[in-house]
Amino acid sequence: MDNFSVTQAVNLAPTGIATFAKTPLCTDMNQLHADIAILGAPCDISIQGRSGARLGPRGIRLQSTRFSYSPEGSYDPERDDFYISTDKWKIVDCGDADLVPGDLQASFANIEAAVRKIIAQGAMPVVMGGDHSITIPVARGLSAAGPFHVLHFDSHLDWTDNRGGQRFSNGSPCRQMSLLPYVDKMAHLGIHGIGSSRKSDFAEAKAYGDLILSPRQIRRLGIAETLNLLPKGERYFVTIDIDVMDYSIAAGTGSPMHGGLYYDEMSDLLEGVAKLGHIVGFDFVEVAPPYDDASGTTCYLAARLMSDFIGFITKERERLGVKNLGDSSNESC
Ligand SMILES: [Mn+2]
């Protein structure tokens, strides 16, 4: 960018390449040397309702260019603090795991391999779906990061065993994760989709030891008490389905739902979650730009919440004195 500027680079939102928050692009995973690696998983061939989530990473990346990170960090006037300083944290965008048309398992294999590589390179994966089935290969790719608890934000329980014999749909990631030996307890937050799961699915999830709370129950409890109820432990994987957010602010998804969470509630929950323990990674799924409004409300909400969560996670690591790479490794991407 500097090559073309006669003045100091201003880096406005409409300029530059639309990586996530305009972070550096690193498509050669062997060169990956970062604290946090953003990955797109534009796979929506296992969706049960309206497709379109394969365009999620594109939509989120475009809206995420409305903010970008800087050496001094982003100033939050509410907390009077700076977040995500590029002097302290190295965040890169690794591009997308390749989608193989019509081949779910091959597409899953690409996602799993990318996540496994990110973990092996010592970075925290942040994966953009894609439909919620992509959480299955993401969780598989996290095997070396386990054992961990799973915190699942969604309108739907996603504990379906199979539909017509298909066990890897966007309605079954939590069922599939429960089968992984390194997945410990699960908490499902924001669940309120009527008729999307069988009563027997809820019974089986509870028998596994899962906590299930609706938005109404979260409001009655309050954020602090809700956080108190979450499983205690050292490590957590967090999976966020955009349809946990209320229809009025998140229409751009396959199965939008009234009665969901609002931005402040979700952001506050994520801030609390970041303080529970070590976050091994998170994914953000089901954003479907074809159903979004013209201003990109849903895509921007997803980008904002992802960035908030990255900010809360890095802030907690700063507080704990966790080692980070910052800009000390400029030779590799
Ligand atoms: Mn889901």
Image (cartoon, helix red, strand yellow):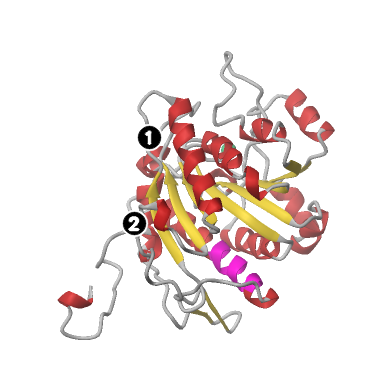
Majority secondary structure of magenta residues: helix
Q: Which residues are magenta?
A: 308-317
State the residue in front, 67 or 329: 329
**Secondary structure state at the residue bearing disc 1:** loop
Indicate the quadrant where residue 211 lies: top right
Q: Quadrant of ligand 1?
A: top right
Q: Which residue is mark 2?
A: 62
Q: Position of residue 107 (x, y in %)?
A: 43, 32
Residue type at mark 1: give it: Leu
314 in magenta: yes
Q: How many marks?
A: 2
Asked if the beta carbon under badge 1 is closer than 8 A to the nearest atom of ligand 1, the reply is no
What's the residue at 41%, 42% (across, down)?
97
Q: Which residue is mark 1?
A: 99
Residue type at mark 2: give it: Leu
In the picture, measured across the screen, residue 156 lies left or right of residue 25, that is right
What's the residue at 56%, 39% (across, down)?
135
What's the residue at 80%, 51% (across, down)?
231
Which is more N-terminal, label 1 or label 2?
A: 2
296 in magenta: no
What's the residue at 44%, 71% (across, down)?
329
State the residue in front, 131 or 35: 35
Above/below status of 76 relative to 30: below
State the residue in front, 273 or 244: 273
Crowding around mark 1 (Cα neighbors within 10 Å: few <14, some 14 to 19, many 20+) is many
Q: Position of residue 119 (x, y in %)?
A: 56, 52
Q: Are marks 2 and 1 in contact (CB under 8 Å)?
A: no
In the picture, measured across the screen, residue 84 lies left or right of residue 179, that is left
